Amino acid sequence: MEIVETLNQTLLHKNSGQNKACQLDIEVYKNIAFSYSQMENSIAVLSDMQLNKSFVFTSKTALELGLNFKENPTVIDSIWEEEILKKIHPDDKLKKYIHELRFFKFLDSLQPEERSDFSVLSRMKIKDKDDVYKFIQHRMFYFYSPFNGKLRFALCLYNIALEQSQFLSSDFLIINSTKGEVIVEDKLNYKNILSQRELEILKLVGEGFTSKEIAHFLSISINTVSRHRQNILEKLNVKNSIKAINDSLAKAP
């Protein structure tokens, strides 16, 4: 999936020790993640961009969502919590990736002292222990290193949402928690932006199929699939700069 590859290149390459290494004490941030998991019954995932590892701190919420992490924390050799991600509705999972790339680019445009004011607040659908989709609340915070100015940790918190009405939609926000303001609201309506073929490919990409598999399903060439996937990224404006965020929002209905 190109959006995941873009995120990996953005998050890991920009934090790959080009300057001096970050000296932040990881145990301090692991304790923060553990505390959230215990106080709020969250699933708390601390991702370390310098080590390309994640630490998943579990709670009873994990059992309600059909997740059985045998250790606390469970250590993953990736910044992606795949056991959780694969349970998220395919449409929401792709929007989550796009939204997180926007969040990184937004924070990257700010002065270092401003970044701690902002976080991600989302509502997404995820399968529970009975294989039924229900809404979860997802929050994400970034921690930058004062030693090299690079993003070091991302903390993701997953909780079952209080409101489960079938009339609700998924929601992806960037908020200023200091002022209690919504800064960016993802209002993209993909059906108004993408062609029918691109929507088909987007759905299959979100379900985790490779370009080769998609080409087989749709009876088209791999090159055609690659071209469509590139067009999707360009139409959703997630590739280049903070300007892409503003442009995509301007297109929103």
Image (spheres, rainbow, N blue to C red):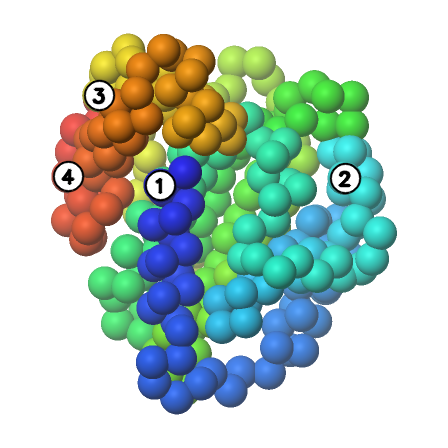
Image mark count: 4
92 sits to left or right of 6: right
Disc 3 residue type?
A: Ile
Residue that numbered label 4 is attached to: 247
Whether residue 172 is visible here, answered yes or no, is no
Q: Nearer the viewer, mark 3 or mark 4?
A: 3
> Which mark identifies residue 2?
1
> Which mark identifies residue 67?
2
Find numbered disc 2 in the image and state the secondary structure of the residue it sits on.
Answer: loop
The mark nearer the N terminus, 3 or 4, is: 3
| Real-space CA distance between mark 2 and mark 4, rounded to the nearest whole angstrom | 38 Å
Q: Quadrant of residue 194?
A: top left
Residue at (34, 50) in percent of width and height: 6
The mark nearer the N terminus, 3 or 1, is: 1
Residue at (45, 31) in percent of width and height: 210
| Real-space CA distance between mark 2 and mark 1, rounded to the nearest whole angstrom | 27 Å
Q: Residue furthest right?
A: 70
Image location of residue 97, percent across then percent down? 42, 42
| Real-space CA distance between mark 3 and mark 1, rounded to the nearest whole angstrom | 18 Å
| Real-space CA distance between mark 3 and mark 4, rounded to the nearest whole angstrom | 13 Å
| Real-space CA distance between mark 4 and mark 1, rounded to the nearest whole angstrom | 20 Å
Disc 4 residue type?
A: Asp
Q: Quadrant of residue 162?
A: top right
Verify CB contact (< 8 Å) between mark 2 and mark 1.
no
Name the one closer to the observer, 209 or 110.
Answer: 209
Residue that numbered label 3 is attached to: 193
| Real-space CA distance between mark 3 and mark 2, rounded to the nearest whole angstrom | 35 Å
Q: Nearer the viewer, mark 2 or mark 1?
A: 1
Disc 2 residue type?
A: Leu
